[in-house]
Amino acid sequence: MARNFQTPGIILKNNRFGEIHKGVVFLSPEQGLVDAVAYGAFSPKGKLRSVTNPLCTGILFLYRDPVKDTRKITDMDCREFFEGIRASVAKFFTASVWLETVLRTFGGDARETYDLLLRCLRLLDGGTEEEAPRLLALFLWRHLEGSGTAPDLRDCGRCGRTRKDRDVFHYLRGNPGFLCSECAHSSGALESSVPLSPGALAFLGHASSRELETAARVGLDAGSLEGLKRAMLWLAEDLAGRPLASIRAGEGIL
């Protein structure tokens, strides 16, 4: 790899490095998750101060130290700030869940993950706050599919019985798939599981089979959406193998 290179990227996380330097983690469609340092970015006059914050998207210019195998951000051409997301608490916490989910669970195709995240951020940025819960579920489901961990929508994950159109499935944390009502009840955990209505399951089917922008327009009643959203958040944490700070921070808002 050349010492000086550039790549598209979406900033996922910052941390303080020394007094005025910023540690940056970003997603590149070419290299996956990249750790780099933006020197002076926490200085009041640092040229990289605002353009290397989470959600900033554009072209990053970097220098790779071949001895230490570290990367330094020398410049960034920030193309999108997503001001519509930053101006809304609901949208901001939705995006925060996406960024942390990618950060904690990335392991698939970098270009596919980058494309999914960028397209969903654009939909969230230009959409209404009322659309945020549907987009939250849509991104998480597509991300689960990309990672190969999305539960089967047709068959019970325990008994294998095929679901009928009007059947409800349940999600119980720690289980590899969705459960039919009989299996959820026999497990003794029906009350602690999340029911997924036929409408919620149909929404996920559309999310799998349709173009992202088309699937984002599929409507869902409030009750079905609440169960779907809760199940997707649980699935994201199960995939990460740990609680996600963004979900805890956004409790009552997401």
Image: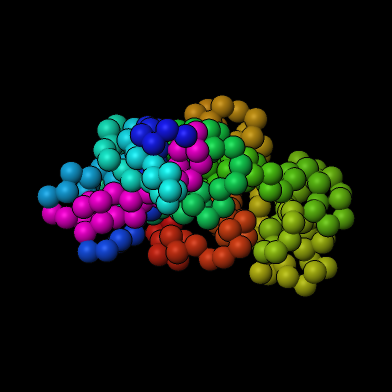
Q: Is residue 180 left or right of residue 129?
A: right
At x 56%, y 52%, the residue is 105
Question: Looking at the picture, does residue 250 appear above or below residue 69?
Answer: below
The tally of labels here is 0
Residue at 26% across, 38% down: 75
Q: Which of 245 and 18 is in front in this view?
A: 18
Q: Residue most toward the bottom?
A: 188
User: Which quadrant of the structure image shows residue 181?
Assistant: bottom right
**The C terminus appears in which quarter of the rendering?**
bottom left
Q: As drawn, which residue projects farthest toward the front?
A: 67
Q: Nearer the viewer, residue 57 or 40?
A: 40
Q: Can residue 166 be seen in this view?
A: no
Residue 198's x, y, as percent? Answer: 68, 45
Which quadrant of the figure has residue 220?
top right
* Spot occupied by residue 169 in the image (x, y as percentages of width and height): 73, 53
Return the residue found at the far left: 45
Instruction: Give x and y (percent) for residue 239.
Output: 62, 56
Q: Quadrant of residue 129?
A: top left
Looking at this view, is 157 or 27 the one in front?
27
Q: Does the magenta stretch include residue 167?
A: no
| Colouring scheme applied when the structure was drawn | rainbow
221 sits to left or right of 27: right
Task: Relative to 20, say whether 132 is above or below.
Answer: above
Which secondary structure dominates the residues rendered in magenta?
strand
In this orientation, does residue 74 appear?
A: yes
**242 relative position to 169: left or right:** left
- Magenta-colored stretch includes residue 33: yes
- Tell me which residue sits at (27%, 33%) in the image: 77
What residue span does the magenta drawing correspond to?
Answer: 20-44
Is 118 located above or below residue 187 in the figure? Answer: above
* Percent x, y of residue 140: 55, 46
Q: Give the residue displayed 65% in from the left and 41% down from the top.
A: 145
